[in-house]
Image (tube, helix red, strand yellow):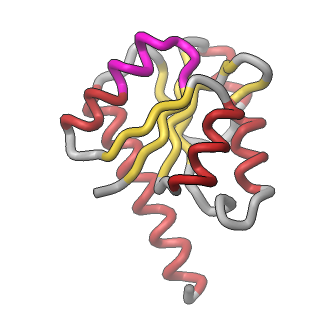
Amino acid sequence: MPVVLVVEDDSELLQVLTDALADEGWLALGAGSGAEALQIARSRGVDVVLADLLLPGGNGLELERKFQAIPTLANIPFVFMTGSLTEVSKIGPRPVLLKPFSLHQATAALAASLDREDAVVASCGH
């Protein structure tokens, strides 16, 4: 069962997302901030991160860079979510979900990110 870490500062949306992903067969963990996400990822381990682009005290891209700076977390793929088209244009070629999105869109993006990571690891011979 893949482990997804959902990082969202809106506590109601965080609960809805983690519950819905769990119903779809994911082990869904929730974090309300980037700092909490790093703590959970270090202690628990995760396969993929679904992160809001706009977080208190930073943003999802900064969180991704912090993960990449930690060897044990560096290869965890990120899928971003945002309600702002302006933010989508700033992130470059990364998977992003525009709020509101469907559960199907979220699970498809998460699964595709895991598949891409598996392909990269296989092509590197790891």
* Magenta stretch: dominant secondary structure: helix
Question: At 68% across and 25% down in the image, what residue appears?
Answer: 89
- Corner quadrant of residue 22: top left
Left or right of 81 on screen, residue 37:
right
- Corner quadrant of residue 52: top right
Query: Furthest residue to the front?
Result: 43
State the image coordinates of residue 28 (x, y, percent, origin top left).
37, 40
Left or right of 50 on screen, residue 111:
left
Compared with 21, 1 (above or below) is below
Tell me the quadrant of the picture where the N terminus can be found: bottom left
Question: At 68% across and 60% down in the image, what residue appears?
Answer: 74
Numbered-mark total: 0
Left or right of 94 on screen, residue 46:
left
Q: Give yes or no for residue 13 being in the magenta stretch.
A: yes
Q: Give yes or no for residue 88 being in the magenta stretch.
A: no
State the image coordinates of residue 46 (x, y, percent, origin top left).
49, 53
State the image coordinates of residue 119 (x, y, percent, origin top left).
47, 72
Question: At 36% across and 25% down in the image, what residue appears?
Answer: 17
Compared with 79, 120 (above or below) is below
The range drawn in magenta is 8-17
